[in-house]
Amino acid sequence: MASLSVEQEPLELYTPSAEVKESAFIKDRAKVTEQARKDLEAFWAEAASEYEWFSPWEKVLDDSNKPFYQWFVGGKVNIVDNCLDRHVRTWRRNKLAIIWEGENGEVRTFSYHALNREVCMFANILRSMGVHKGDRVTIYMGRIPELPIAMLACAKIGAVHSVVYGGFSVEALHGRLEDSQSNVVITCDGGRMNGKLVELKKIADEAIRRAGSVEHVIVVRHTGQEVAMEAGRDYWYHDLMALPIAKSAAGSSRCETEVMDAEDPLFMLYTSGTTGKPKAIVHTHGGYMVGVGTTLKWVFDLRDEDRWWCTADPGWITGHSYIVYGPLLLGATSFMYEGAPTYPYPNRWWSMIEKYGINILYTAPTAIRGLMRFGEAWPNRHDLSSLRLLGTVGEPINPEAWRWYHRVIGKGRSPIMDTWWQTETGMFMITPMPETPLKPGSGTIPFPGIEADVYDETGKPVAPGEEGYLVLKTPWPAMLRTIYKDPDRYVQQYWSRFPGVYFTGDSARKDADGYFWIIGRVDDVIKVSGYRLGTAEIESALVSHPAVAEAAAIGLPHEIKGNAIHAFVILRAGIEPSEQLISDLKAHVVHEMGPIANPERIEIVTSLPKTRSGKIMRRVLKARAQGLPEGDLSTLEE
Ligand code: WTA
């Protein structure tokens, strides 16, 4: 793996202003880190005591059955009790929880009271439909308020939500439905993206037809577009919410919050891994809550008077942790936007920051690079002085984009929190805090309580500046507990490469100051515009086309997207290659997987580099495509 070139480390260091430092929630990171190092359990117990527990835990960390760690063992809790119930008993009941703007300019707001009411009513509906504690419910929606409402309603009654990103398409949804065996699907008629209507219900129908396990479909009317409703299976959300059963017998919208064990599953979220189909990562009520709430508070210094905007989609982990659960845990006001950043003009985001007075913006490098292209004039037309802190996530940020973000959007005042973490980690792991001196392109150092390192092939720490595998050496409360239905794969994939430590799948280096620099994935995961895709899913979408015999997908560097998908296909005998066929194949991948998986380029080939056991050597394809040395070819059989 030494073949990857590493960007020259920039010499600049950005130290936070006295003002930022003084107002930060954590003023002495080193001290807090030291405390956590001395007594990890006491550290997390203190963090957990910020939340409401129905009954306290008996043990903070149970590591008697590694790597199946358990946190806050014996504690009774429900994350929704902490996101909603707790706040509506205080003055926050009248505080805005969610401000939402549709791509067409429509605005909807929910106070904590209003959000809680809607969640309670929907939870009553789900219960009356026979959804019980532990049942899986699939949510497939656009970026609308009913998406967090549906997630919270499931969690409130102890059902396990499985959100499938609304940008995914038929086969991606089908695979996730089938694996989770959900009986209930919550979706919407359609979404708005880039001035166009997305046919979500139609995609859901096709996926449900392939899956077969679904009994009920609840459909939110959002765009008002024409959709087919199947009698006895499909119900309109607004019809259900108007039923008397949405309310309790006393006519109130009350709904009892289920008492959960700290270790009971809260949600599962499918993500791409090393080989094969996406796997569902399982997170819990107790530990996830503590990890997400603590990291958001400490890293983004989120205060009651703040307006927070995380631009991610709720369908990915960033949205789960930092649009839905984190901000609500802190009783914050969160802004959500439905559509494309450049619709109708490239100032859309900047105009909304001004309009709503956003204080903290958390986004992805790909968005920054995309908006940077349109020049400074667009953001400069708007008053962005409300911004106090900025953040980024999803892929390494190139120093050029970092500097633009810092100078043009943050006016040189707002530090950038470059947060490294994963679906699996649930919460920020390597991240600055407002007081941390910053180096553009580095996520800086591990969060208190987290020990990270960079290992060589043999599991030894590498020297400073050298590239290796990023590992995590201590358990943390928001860690994944397992892979749904596949505990062996959990052990195999994360805990076997280097026994006893968590393997991230990323390569990185650590500099002389102990700052971490993420380089990229070392497995078959491709990060396209910050979205995590697996080569296997793209390849299986390609081979499901009748013209394709074999396919291989790789990621190659792309100026805006970070990586773009390049695919190589072998056609079936008798099929003639043509430009038309290539565009048909691209359309087929989009139909099966969704627009984010659209290959940048498809090349028709007559053979693929394989090992003697028949595994495609994507590493070789990648090196060839980039004109780089092909490395060790001793196992190649072409
Ligand atoms: C990458 C997203 C560099 C990394 C929260 C990781 C990053 C994968 C950063 C997880 C960052 C995430 N700098 N790379 N700040 N944040 N990554 O599961 O490769 O969608 O392993 O979670 O994104 O992607 P996932």
Image (cartoon, rainbow, N blue to C red):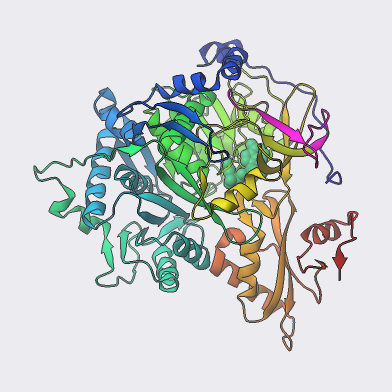
Q: Residue shown at 58%/49% (left/top)?
A: 490
Tell me what residue is drawn at x 29 percent, y 29 percent: 54
- Residue 530 seen in the figure: no
Q: Quadrant of residue 201?
A: bottom left
Residue 564 percent coordinates (x, y): 70, 56
Q: Which residues are magenta?
A: 448-467
Q: Is residue 235 above or below residue 350?
A: below
Q: Quadrant of ligand 1?
A: top right
Percent x, y of residue 355:
43, 34
Residue 621: x and y, percent?
81, 62
Whether residue 451 is in magenta: the answer is yes
Q: Between residues 71 and 443, which one lies in front from this camera angle?
A: 71
Nearer-the-camera pick, 291 or 6: 291
- Residue at the far front: name it: 64
Q: Quadrant of residue 9?
A: top right
Q: Main secondary structure of the magenta part?
A: loop
